[in-house]
Image (tube, rainbow, N blue to C red):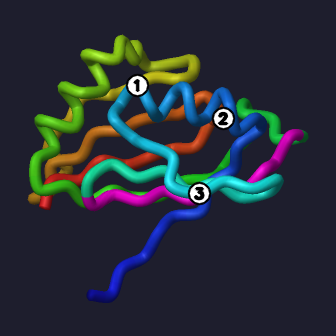
Amino acid sequence: MDHATPNLPSRNFEETTQFYSAIDFVQGFRDEGWMILSNRAITLEFFLHPDLNPSTSWFSCCLRLDDLHEFYATCQAAVVPETTSGRPRIQPPRYEGEMRIGALIDPDGSLIRLIQN
């Protein structure tokens, strides 16, 4: 099966692992400069970027989810704040045209768009 895996920055692999572990991701690979985390069918790959300024980060990706509500509820249960500023944070799903979209901003400032399949 063809698939793609987003490549996102991490200032610190330990902190990235801690954040994503709270929303059910597990580490599958790690070396000095690369890390792979997975949650069921979702795989995110991270490269080490210790000089990243999260306030000016422009990194992003889309997660197309069969159950957006479940993923969002997992983020809420992990006590990711639902707010319009700061990081990390989540923004509730809403309809944009025909699509239902939410957002997750991770501690490094990456925008993870959450899109209902």
Tell me if residue 58 is in the magenta stretch.
no
At label 3, the amino acid type is Phe
Q: Residue at x 57, y 59 (%)?
A: 45
Say which of 29 and 93 sits in front. 29
> In 3D space, how far apart are the residues under numbered discs 1 and 2 (Cα atoms)?
16 Å
Which residue is identified by label 3?
29
Q: In screen coordinates, is 107 left or right of 70?
A: right
- Give x and y (percent) for residue 40: 26, 53
Q: Nearer the viewer, mark 1 or mark 2?
A: 1
Tell me if residue 48 is in the magenta stretch.
yes
| Residue 22, numbered label | 1
Q: Residue at x 57, y 18 (%)?
A: 86
Q: In screen coordinates, is 30 left or right of 64?
A: right
For mark 1, give the secondary structure: loop
Q: Earlier in the sequence, mark 1 or mark 2?
A: 1
Q: In screen coordinates, is 32 left or right of 6?
A: right
Q: Nearer the viewer, mark 3 or mark 1?
A: 3
At label 1, the amino acid type is Ala
First to last magenta residue range: 41-50
> In 3D space, how far apart are the residues under numbered discs 3 and 1 (Cα atoms)?
18 Å
